[in-house]
Image (cartoon, grey):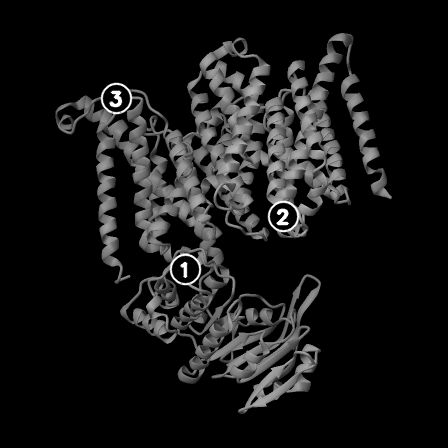
């Protein structure tokens, strides 16, 4: 740790700087023209700033960091680079949870949705872990395919009920992340990500060790089951908080950890802050670009990330095969 | 003994179910109901056979029982194409482009997609088939995101037009379209028939197939092309039915002791048609159209998929 | 001292271990040999608590294995199995430093790094310390993993087929290293091994297993005899003695 410390401090500073610049841009780009000086002179602009811009920016940062860390934890626990919320049925499970809360509880509150979504994602993650234990053929590209099929099953079940209740279009909306509607009072669930980020940092080594396999973890005196359980709970918390408050965001949990690992290796404790910041940077950048290209309209971030992330992921798959 | 009667008894069963489907509770408007039901029946047979052939061939060349070509991006391309049409033409879509043209372009697009992926994967470096799939899935996700975006932008009334494409509507079939699809299917079946015997060897794996003197890469290319056509046909006709292929292919392996692919595909086709006809019958007469057959089959097929994974006696 | 008594292990209907008992002598290399399916790896896994036995007890220093806490045991006994995830981009140094986890809980102190340095030096991988493990050759990787278990600083080292997939040169390297662990540092090493000549050359003690039971448990010299090996493996053996070394020939007999 001492040997590579300086190099990493440099990277921390650079990525933190980039993140701060983007936060600043995100604060002051939008339909309503707000400048820094206005915040003190113009009460109207100040309240728009506080009600809309700040929540939006904060939730972007937290979502980016949370999804990247969730992806990293999932990849360690499943010992597979291509496993992430979008390739293990996690997003679909969160969506299914919201769907059932809406069907079962008329006028479901945000808390209802959150709890349902959390319960569904957790069960789906556990089920997925059991599934990959049952698969003997553990090729790097096969496991995510199984995960995607699993997601399709959950989707099929959701669709069955959504169609009956005539809310198919609504469910489409939940799956497409969008920060434009994030305002004060509706996004606070994303703060649940904070403790997970903190816990992720504290338990970084344990997740890496669990990633080396069950016997490896037991040899070092760790309770493998407890680490896996903790990891899955963290992942479900992050994913359901995000899906409930801003909708599903694909690929972030998949590509950010892969890129960071390619550049800086896999020692989680060292790279975790970089991963978290890279996720935040990616989301901020995509959101800002989405706000600018069809100004004054917006392209939802789900689409921006869907396109960009998809292309990057293709690159990663093709690159790894060499 | 049992094997000898398997195919004849399935044919018989299908005939019974088909007859029931056509004549059950026709009421007085026989002239109105009968032609429509016959068209629906024919559509289901075309789709059933396409799905059966594509799944069996695909699972054999990938040496895997729980995958289906339908998870690749075909459906997203199809839905994206329909979404874009609706986006541009709104409720005038049906005047702007005939269903035949629509079908034709959709099939061409999906085949183009297959060729593109094939070049991408098998072009320079040798990559494995799972990568091909994963790339297909990711491209599919890309198209899907774009489709979702447009779906949110267009207004809810027009969305219902797209929604019609997303779920099977055996109900309003066009005879012209069905004819084109049937001819496409027939040509593909005739073409692929003489290659089916090679599947018996290919199922042993690439190395053994090459050792036994097959031109493996060339055969795989041919099979992939046929799969692309078949998947396109069934998707364009009735939309995505992801899990039907997995469901019927695996049930076929259970029922059918022989590993001769010429027989396996026949058996699987019969089974797949049976599922569709029975499913549609239930949807029409038990659920009163409150759901539709794709959704039901994906539901059942999905659960069966889970069973396959957890049934650890099976090699997966 | 590791001692186990009447260990029974079943997988479903099949009895893999049928009431085996033995004592692993301290400060020696003990090899577990025997035909495929004899239960060697299962026994090794039970000895270190990776698997639970149906009946019987395992004692470490006269205290039952179950009475140790996870961390406590990880400081006394380490196990190296084959199935490690090699897809991770960890440097050798990172990997070896995980061996200190039972002591440091992730907060490495000066003395922890000291142990890591020593372990790497002992296994002669100091030059490779900044290389990612997925870039190492088979022999280097095996030494890196052994180095990690060394950094764990346990009295007992259990290795499951450490020579798997290694060529002769690297196999010899690994075995010499284990020998030094015992001779210079006084550790106790238990290995499951297939190549009978490696067992004959490098181990002090041999436990031979067959069909879920122990059939011989003796000094290496006593087990490496023609009629004994013929009994274990059910094929003819010829023992060639040269320079006081016994070489087992089982070809063309």
Residue C52 is situated, as x and y percent measured from the top left of the image, at 58, 66
The quadrant in which residue C4 appears is bottom right
Residue at 42% x, 24% y: name it.
B149
Say whether mark 1 and mark 2 are on the same chain.
Answer: no
Q: Is residue B23 left or right of residue C24?
A: right
The residue beneath circle 2 is B310
Residue C231 is situated, as x and y percent measured from the top left of the image, at 70, 81
Query: Chain letter of disc 2?
Result: B
User: In what element is the residue under mark 3?
Assistant: loop
- The answer for how far apart the CA atoms under marks 3 and 1 are is 51 Å
The residue beneath circle 1 is C135
In which quadrant is the C terminus of chain C drawn? bottom right
Q: Is residue B47 left or right of residue A99?
A: right
- The answer for how far apart the CA atoms under marks 3 and 2 are is 53 Å
Taking depth in this image into account, of C108 and C117 the one nearest to the observer is C117
Which dot, 2 or 1, sits closer to the camera? 1
User: In what element is the residue under mark 1?
Assistant: helix
Residue C63 is situated, as x and y percent measured from the top left of the image, at 50, 77
Query: Taking A296 as reference, is C109 above or below it?
Result: below
Would you say residue A184 is visible in this rendering?
no
The residue beneath circle 3 is A31
Total labels: the figure holds 3
Residue C33 is situated, as x and y percent measured from the top left of the image, at 60, 76
């Amino acid at each position: 740790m001492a040997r590579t410390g300086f190099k990493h401090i440099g990277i921390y500073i650079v990525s933190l700087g980039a993140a701060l610049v983007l936060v600043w841009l995100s604060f002051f780009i939008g339909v309503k023209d707000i400048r820094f000086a206005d915040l003190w002179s113009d009460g109207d602009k100040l309240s728009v700033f506080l009600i809309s811009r700040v929540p939006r920016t904060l939730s972007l940062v937290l979502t980016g960091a949370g999804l990247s860390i969730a992806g990293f934890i999932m990849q360690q626990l499943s010992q597979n680079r291509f496993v992430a919320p979008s390739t293990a049925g996690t997003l679909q499970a969160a969506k299914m949870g919201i769907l059932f809360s809406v069907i079962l509880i008329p006028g479901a509150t945000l808390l209802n949705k959150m709890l349902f979504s959390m319960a569904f994602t957790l069960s789906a993650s556990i089920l997925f872990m059991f599934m990959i234990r049952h698969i003997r053929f553990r090729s790097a590209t096969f496991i995510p395919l199984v995960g995607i099929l699993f997601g399709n099953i959950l989707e099929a079940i959701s669709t069955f009920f959504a169609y009956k209740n005539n809310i198919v279009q609504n469910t489409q909306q939940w799956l497409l992340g969008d920060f434009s509607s994030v305002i004060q009072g509706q996004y606070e669930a994303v703060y649940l990500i904070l403790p997970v980020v903190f816990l992720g940092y504290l338990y970084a080594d344990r997740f890496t060790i669990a990633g080396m396999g069950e016997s490896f973890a037991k040899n070092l005196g760790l309770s493998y089951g407890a680490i896996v359980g903790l990891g899955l709970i963290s992942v479900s918390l992050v994913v359901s908080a995000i899906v409930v408050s801003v909708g599903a965001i694909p690929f972030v949990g998949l590509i950010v950890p892969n890129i960071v690992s390619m550049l800086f290796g896999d020692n989680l404790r060292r790279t975790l802050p970089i991963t978290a910041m890279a996720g935040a940077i990616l989301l901020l950048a995509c959101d800002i670009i989405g706000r600018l290209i069809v100004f004054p309209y917006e392209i939802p971030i789900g689409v921006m990330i869907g396109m960009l992330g998809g292309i990057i992921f293709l690159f990663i798959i093709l690159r790894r095969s060499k | 003994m049992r094997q000898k009667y398997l195919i004849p008894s399935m044919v018989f069963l299908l005939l019974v179910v088909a007859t029931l489907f056509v004549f059950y509770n026709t009421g007085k408007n026989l002239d109105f109901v009968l032609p429509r039901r016959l068209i629906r029946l024919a559509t289901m047979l075309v789709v059933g056979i396409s799905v059966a052939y594509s799944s069996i061939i695909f699972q054999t060349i990938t040496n895997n029982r729980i995958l289906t070509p339908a998870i690749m991006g075909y459906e997203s391309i199809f839905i994206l194409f329909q979404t874009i049409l609706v986006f541009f033409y709104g409720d005038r879509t049906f005047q702007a482009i005939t269903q035949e043209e629509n079908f034709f372009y959709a099939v061409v697009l999906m085949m183009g997609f297959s060729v593109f992926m094939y070049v991408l994967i098998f072009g320079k470096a040798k990559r494995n088939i799972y990568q091909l799939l994963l790339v297909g899935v990711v491209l599919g996700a890309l198209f899907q995101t774009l489709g979702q975006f447009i779906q949110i932008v267009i207004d809810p009334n027009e969305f219902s037009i797209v929604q019609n494409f997303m779920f099977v509507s055996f109900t309003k079939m066009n005879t012209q379209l069905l004819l084109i699809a049937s001819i496409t299917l027939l040509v593909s079946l005739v073409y692929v028939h003489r290659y089916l015997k090679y599947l018996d060897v290919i199922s042993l794996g690439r190395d053994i197939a090459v050792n036994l003197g097959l031109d493996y890469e060339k055969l795989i290319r041919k099979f992939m092309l046929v799969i692309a056509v078949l998947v396109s046909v069934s998707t364009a006709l009735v939309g995505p039915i992801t899990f039907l292929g997995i469901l019927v292919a695996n049930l076929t392996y259970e029922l059918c002791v022989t590993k001769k692919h010429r027989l396996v595909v026949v058996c699987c086709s019969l089974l797949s048609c049976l599922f569709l006809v029975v499913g549609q019958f239930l949807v029409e007469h038990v659920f009163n159209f409150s759901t539709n057959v794709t959704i039901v089959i994906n539901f059942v097929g999905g659960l069966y998929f889970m069973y396959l994974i957890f049934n650890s006696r099976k090699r997966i | 001292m590791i001692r186990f008594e009447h260990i029974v292990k079943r997988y479903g209907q099949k009895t893999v271990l049928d009431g085996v008992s033995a004592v692993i002598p301290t400060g020696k290399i003990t090899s577990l040999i025997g035909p495929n399916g004899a239960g060697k790896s299962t026994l090794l896994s039970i000895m270190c608590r990776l698997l639970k036995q149906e009946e019987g007890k395992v004692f470490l220093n006269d205290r039952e294995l179950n009475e140790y806490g996870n961390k406590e045991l990880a400081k006394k006994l380490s196990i190296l199995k084959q199935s490690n995830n090699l897809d991770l981009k960890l440097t050798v140094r990172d990997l070896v430093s995980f061996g200190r986890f039972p002591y440091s809980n992730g907060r490495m102190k000066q003395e922890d790094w000291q142990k890591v340095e020593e372990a790497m030096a002992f296994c002669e991988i100091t030059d490779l310390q900044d290389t990612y493990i997925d870039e190492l050759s088979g022999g280097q990787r095996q030494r890196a993993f052994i180095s990690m278990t060394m950094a764990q600083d346990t009295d007992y080292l259990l290795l499951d087929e450490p020579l798997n997939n290694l060529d002769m040169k690297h196999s010899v390297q690994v075995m010499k290293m284990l020998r030094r662990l015992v001779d210079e540092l006084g550790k106790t090493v238990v290995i499951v091994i297939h190549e009978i000549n490696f067992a004959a050359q490098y181990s002090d003690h041999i436990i031979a297993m067959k069909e879920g039971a122990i059939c011989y448990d003796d000094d290496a010299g006593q087990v490496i005899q023609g009629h004994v090996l013929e009994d274990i493996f059910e094929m003819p053996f010829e023992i060639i003695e040269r320079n006081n070394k016994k070489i087992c020939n089982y070809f063309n007999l």
